[in-house]
Image (spheres, rainbow, N blue to C red):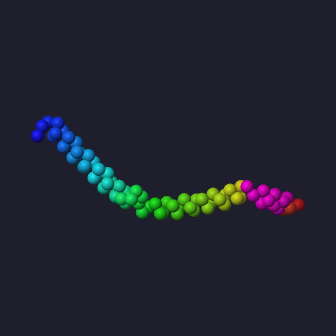
Amino acid sequence: MSFWTAIVVMFAIACGVWLRAQKLRGEKLGFDGEGFGSREHELEAEVEKLRQRIAVLERIATDDKRGTDLARQIEALRD
């Protein structure tokens, strides 16, 4: 075996070890082989809850009728 062949073989072994370590690290963090882990469903549910909360906040912030009703009620309490 020549010097350069040994270098190529060692490089291939090192790449194989590195890929295996990355796979094991991914499994440890909860990722399956398809790209996403079991935590993805939890995160999707949380995002949906946050979207609903944002929609409520937007409705409160942009509802002019409610603001005038509130101002009228405050004025009525002052009298």
Is any atom of residue 74 visible in this view? no
Residue 19, compared with residue 43, is above or below; it is: above
View extreme (right): residue: 79
Quadrant for residue 14, please give it.
Answer: top left
Along the viewing direction, whichever of 68 and 6 lies nearer the viewer: 6
Question: How many marks are shown on the rendered structure?
Answer: 0
Give me the residue at 31% from left, 54% from top.
23
View extreme (left): residue: 1
On screen, residue 38 versus residue 62, left or right, reads left
**Any magenta on residue 79?**
no
Please, what is the dominant secondary structure of the magenta stretch? helix
Quarter of the image that includes the N terminus? top left
On screen, residue 73 versus residue 28, left or right, reads right
On screen, residue 54 versus residue 15, left or right, reads right
Give me the residue at 65% from left, 59% from top.
55
Q: Position of residue 12 (x, y in %)?
A: 22, 45
Along the viewing direction, whichever of 1 and 66 lies nearer the viewer: 1
Q: Position of residue 66 (x, y in %)?
A: 78, 60
Q: Position of residue 70 (x, y in %)?
A: 79, 60
Residue 52, compared with residue 9, is above or below; it is: below
Q: Position of residue 28 (x, y in %)?
A: 34, 58
**Any magenta on residue 73?**
yes
Give me the residue at 79% from left, 59% from top.
65
Quarter of the image that includes the C terminus? bottom right
Give me the residue at 20% from left, 40% from top.
8
Q: Which residues are magenta?
A: 62-75
